[in-house]
Image (spheres, grey):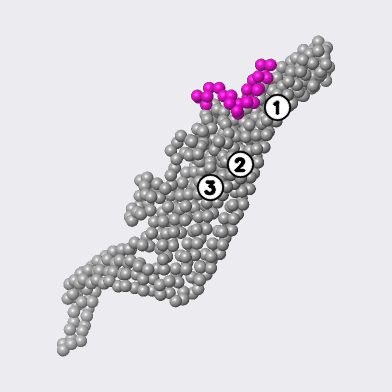
Amino acid sequence: MRAARVALIAATALTGVATHRAAADTLEGALALAYQNNPQINSQRAATRATDETVGVALSGYRPQVSATAQIGEQYIDNLTKGPPPANKSVGAIATSSYGLTTKQTLLNGFQTASRTRLAEGQVFSQRETLRTTEQTILLNAATAYMNLLRDGALLELQRNNVKVLEATLRQTRDRFTAGEVTRTDLAQAESSLAAGRSSLHAAESNYITSKSAYVQVIGVEPGKLASASPVDRFSPASLAAALQRAASQNPAITKAMFDVDSAVEQVKVQEAALYPVLSLNGSMQKSYGSATSLTNLESLSGSVVGQLTVPIYQGGAEYANIRQAKETLGQRRIDLDTARLSVQQNVTQSWGQLEAAKAQIDSTTAQVTSSEIALDGVREEARVGQRTTLDVLNAQQTLVSARTQLVTAQHDRIVASYAVLASVGSLSPQILGLRIETYDPVVHYQQVRDNWIGVRTPDGR
């Protein structure tokens, strides 16, 4: 009976029985580590920061362009000019140098700069949703990896206990065989069950090692003593209809598709701006010392301010092809939005169904475990008085192990499904889960670089 109690403790480890909790890893701690250290999330954060710079590139269209030139050299001159006899001849070498400054300020370009800025901002918002998708995916993977390891640890303990019980059964069967109470068939059945139990134990050990490797990959640290976990239904909508409604407005796959549509609209405007006139103001100033044509000119200063209007008439048709291409892309993005909505709706419905099934499975497997325990105790008592065979005892033991395995699996599925529902509606985030960590805010970097006119260092000093 002591062995049976140990097996029951292992089977219920997922729902609240955890020793030395203060020294154990927790699911919340694992999620926090994954959020902070997972390389996929950090890669997307870097991609988001890189996308922020596209807004600065677009805004540069509002700003002046300034360039400076400098030229230094030695000039040899041999001039013969017409005049009263004799002809004028000048021969010699002179050092020449010139320094210039030119500026250009676009005044009108068919609102192309404004459209490019809105396009870049749309890309920034889209990339933030991609980052949010990655964060949710990693958090869900971390929760799954944690629960997989917790489940496989419990199943491993179950199989170890099962082997111990089968070993004890085999010893009892041998003693009874020696005493002539059972046949060789009973002994062979006990030996066969023990061999099968050991095989299951090896498989459980392999599964545990695999889950441990996945845990390290997602969370980034070696697991310690894992604590029990609980579902996160309190953060989920109360009904499937409410879940679908929340997902329609908060799921990052849908919001990203919306921003992609907005960006595609601006891309059409950018391409159409190629058909509009461009008005710019150009200024220049140049200071020259020496002359490339005359030995008598020592220095000169020149400057100009010129307004330039460029009206495109025909540029080979590329501008029209670009406009048509942008419009087709816009149509594609709108179709992608519809696809995203249907995909999210299917995902929410599926996750919700899995959660409800897991809840029902726990109730049924709990009843099955209770009944199997009572049945095993009864079969053992009946076997002692000769009313049951050794095979009956072994079958009852295997039925109990199978029921406990199903209960552990159902408890695992229950918790993972609750996280999957949160992810499907777009609510699987550190803020909603209440993780006690500093969350990454992409807006901070965006505000740091948006209006920078000059500088090559990133905000973190690189």
- Amino acid type, label 1: Ala
Which label number is shown at residue 250?
A: 3
Can residue 366 be seen by looking at this rendering? yes
Q: Residue at x 49, y 43 (%)?
A: 41
Give yes or no for contact between labels 3 and 2 (Cβ–Cβ under 8 Å). no
For this orientation, the residue located farthest to the left is 85
Q: Is residue 440 magenta?
A: no
N-terminal of the pair, mark 1 or mark 3, is: 3
Provide the residue designation for mark 2.
Answer: 239
- On residue 367, the disc is 1
Is 238 situated above or below 119? above
Mark positioned earlier in the residue sequence (3 or 2): 2
Residue density around tag 2, few if under 14, some if 14–19, many if 20 or more, within 10 Å? few
Amino acid type at circle 2 is Ser
Q: Disc 2, disc 1: CB below 8 Å?
A: no
Q: Crowding near pointer 1: few (<14 within 10 Å), some, many (20+)?
A: few
Q: Is 19 inside the magenta-drawn segment?
A: yes
Q: Amino acid at mark 3?
A: Gln
Range covered by the magenta-colored residues: 1-24
Q: Residue at x 54, y 62 (%)?
A: 330
Overall secondary structure of the magenta stretch? helix
User: Marks 1 and 3, Cα distance to the nearest angstrom?
Assistant: 39 Å
Residue 214 appears anywhere in the view: no
